[in-house]
Image (cartoon, helix red, strand yellow):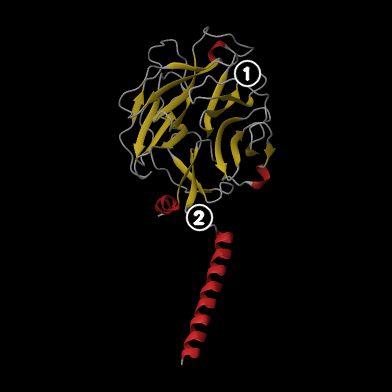
């Protein structure tokens, strides 16, 4: 009897072990990780509102094919360049371009679940500069060292800075504000003046006191992407690199995948959406052939979320 029980127990253990192995194999094939990726998006002409792409590997993206927040603020009431960050309390904070020209601020809203959003607000961050031409592509970043949100954007103030061959109304510099609660904000400050017209900048934290700024050199004929480095999220960012992207590229966003960083950007000159991979922001590899982006997607921000967030959005 004891020998029979021993054989049955041994068989049960072996079966359980085999099932575990099979489960691990299937996990490797189907990605059982609890992590997923969300990519904010919009479609031209940018009047329909916020869209999402999702992915389980940060390489292959699916469009949820619906909008989640219709723009209601700003002169033109559009939603371009939606940028998102999640705070330590789980709240998602969204900022976006709400007009091509004429506005001196951008749109803002928050959500606990990415579906139900707060009342939209217009943040007049350049109201103190009456000659401001535009407020473009606000990018939000949570600084976990200072426990505050940093928002940066590009604006043109004619005849304020040196320029190349571009027009005065297209000579951008990056500005910033900070906030801990989206009720009170710091004064607007000049964030980056690299000596040329700059737009579409995004902050990347690699480690404590180790930050990278991926930016677009918007001068003619360049209009391509570069990187700069700082030991603080607010800069100053120095050692601006040579370009790593083709001409006529914009709207970068960065996501870390294992030991590499993927830089997605709109290669509008080539009429495609591209991705480059880097581990050090010095050497870059074009991996555009390895990624898939749904047609019509325009640039936003990639964040990591739990898989259950995606499953809820898919319902």
Q: Earlier in the sequence, mark 1 or mark 2?
A: 2
Residue 58: percent from the left, percent from the top?
Answer: 56, 46
In what quadrant of the picture does the C terminus appear? bottom left
Query: Residue reaching furthest bottom?
Result: 1
The secondary structure type at the circle numbered 2 is: loop
Residue 281: percent from the left, percent from the top?
Answer: 63, 32
| Residue labelled with disc 2 | 33
Mark on residue 219? Answer: 1
Quarter assignment of residue 145: top left
Residue 38: percent from the left, percent from the top?
Answer: 48, 44
Badge nearest the viewer, 1 or 2 = 2
Quarter assignment of residue 189: top left
Badge 2: residue crowd in 10 Å (few <14, some 14–19, many ≥20): few
Residue drawn at x 63%, y 21% as measured from the top left: 240
Residue drawn at x 31%, y 23% as measured from the top left: 184
Quarter assignment of residue 295: top right
Residue drawn at x 51%, y 8% as measured from the top left: 160
Residue drawn at x 50%, y 55% as measured from the top left: 33
Marks 1 and 2 sit apart, C-alpha to C-alpha, by 42 Å
> With 276 as the anchor, is 116 left or right in this view?
left
Badge 1: residue crowd in 10 Å (few <14, some 14–19, many ≥20): many
Residue 21: percent from the left, percent from the top?
Answer: 57, 68
> With 262 as the anchor, is 89 left or right in this view?
left
In depth, the one of 2 and 288 nearer the eye is 2
The secondary structure type at the circle numbered 1 is: loop
Mark on residue 258? Answer: none
């Amino acid at each position: 009897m004891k020998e029979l029980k021993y054989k049955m127990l041994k068989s049960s253990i072996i079966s359980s072990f085999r099932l575990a192995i099979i489960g691990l194999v299937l996990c490797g094939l189907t990605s059982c990780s609890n992590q997923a990726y969300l990519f904010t998006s919009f479609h031209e002409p940018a009047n329909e509102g916020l869209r999402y792409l999702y992915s389980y590997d940060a390489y292959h993206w699916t469009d949820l094919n619906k909008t989640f927040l219709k723009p209601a603020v700003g002169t033109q009431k559009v939603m371009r360049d939606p940028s998102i960050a999640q705070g330590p309390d789980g709240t998602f904070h969204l900022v976006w371009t709400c007009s091509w020209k004429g506005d001196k601020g951008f749109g803002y809203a928050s959500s606990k679940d990415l579906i139900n959003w707060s009342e939209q607000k217009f943040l007049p961050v350049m109201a103190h500069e009456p000659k401001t031409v535009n407020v473009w592509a606000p990018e939000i970043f949570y600084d976990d060292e200072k426990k505050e949100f940093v928002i940066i954007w590009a604006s043109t103030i004619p005849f304020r800075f040196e320029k190349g061959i571009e027009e005065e109304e297209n000579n951008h510099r990056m500005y910033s504000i900070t906030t801990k609660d989206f009720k009170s904000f710091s004064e607007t400050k000049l964030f980056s003046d690299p000596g040329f017209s700059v737009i579409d900048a995004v902050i990347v934290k690699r480690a404590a006191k180790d930050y990278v700024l991926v930016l677009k050199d918007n001068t003619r004929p360049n209009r391509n992407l570069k990187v700069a480095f700082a030991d603080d999220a607010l800069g100053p960012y120095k050692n601006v690199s040579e370009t790593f992207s083709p001409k006529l590229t914009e709207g970068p966003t960065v996501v870390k995948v294992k030991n590499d960083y993927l830089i997605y950007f709109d290669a509008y000159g080539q009429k495609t959406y591209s991705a480059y991979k880097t581990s050090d922001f010095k050497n870059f590899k074009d991996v555009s052939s390895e990624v898939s982006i749904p047609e019509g997607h325009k640039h936003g921000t990639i964040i990591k979320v739990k898989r259950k967030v995606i499953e809820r959005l898919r319902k």
